[in-house]
Amino acid sequence: MFRDQLRDGVHHVGLALRDPEEFAVAWNEGRSAYPWAVWVALLATAIVGTTTYGMTMGLLGGAGDIFHKAFVCTLAAGLAWAIPLPALYILNSLSGSRLPATSTLLAALVTVSWGGLAMIASIPVNWFFTATVPHPTFVLLVNLVVFTGVGVSMIDVFCRVMERLEPEREFAPLWWLVLVGVIGTELFYCFGLFQFAST
């Protein structure tokens, strides 16, 4: 039973990552009713992405730093994505949106799942440059480029999903991702995630 639910969740995550717009629209229009395992699998993709990428951020500091940064990266990204989430629904509704809360949550969840996948795809890049040029400043620059690229991909996915969900609206609520970026940057700085010190 649990194995079937897990398999179904992974299958739906694959659909969400291949065609996030159609995935969200199918839910919003009632054509698909995704079970709880699908929502958990989308969240798990984001968690796995931030955890594994965070591990590569700690390569210069040894084993302790690898596990510390894996935890801190996941915590900071999770808080950055969750804190502005209520504001997304409330302010979006006040500006004329008629999306139900579940559709708004699904759009955000598909976006962060895409972000987690982009971070997984960036692991070889960070690993390669950290191993070949193990200088803290260079590693910081590589990570800033990676996070910028992940942010751009998330903006693209979120805009496409929101535009398909509400084609009559002139603009997608990009301010949510701006808030995510600002809060995430502050948390990453406070948690020392961008401090790369050689052992």
Image (cartoon, rainbow, N blue to C red):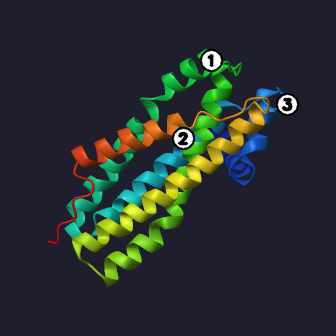
Q: Nearer the viewer, residue 147 or 10?
A: 147
Of labels 2 and 1, the one closer to you: 1
Residue drawn at (66%, 48%) of the image: 10
Q: Are marks 3 and 2 in contact (CB under 8 Å)?
A: no
Q: How many marks?
A: 3
Tag 3 secondary structure:
loop
Lower sequence index among marks 2 and 1: 2
Q: Nearer the viewer, residue 136 or 33?
A: 136
**Residue 89 versus residue 82 in the image, above or below:** above
**Residue 145 versus residue 36 in the image, above or below:** below
**3D distance between C-alphas at marks 2 and 1:** 24 Å
Q: Which mark is residue 93?
A: 1
* 7 relative position to 42: left or right: right
**3D distance between C-alphas at marks 3 and 2:** 22 Å
Q: Which mark is residue 31?
A: 3
Q: Residue furthest left?
A: 199
Q: Which mark is residue 43?
A: 2
Res 41 seen here? no
Q: Are marks 1 and 3 in contact (CB under 8 Å)?
A: no
Amino acid identity at mark 3:
Arg
* 145 relative position to 21: left or right: left
| Residue 186 image offset from top left, x and y in percent | 29, 42
Residue drawn at (35%, 61%) of the image: 55
Amino acid identity at mark 2:
Leu
Q: Residue furthest right?
A: 31
| Quarter of the figure with the N terminus | top right
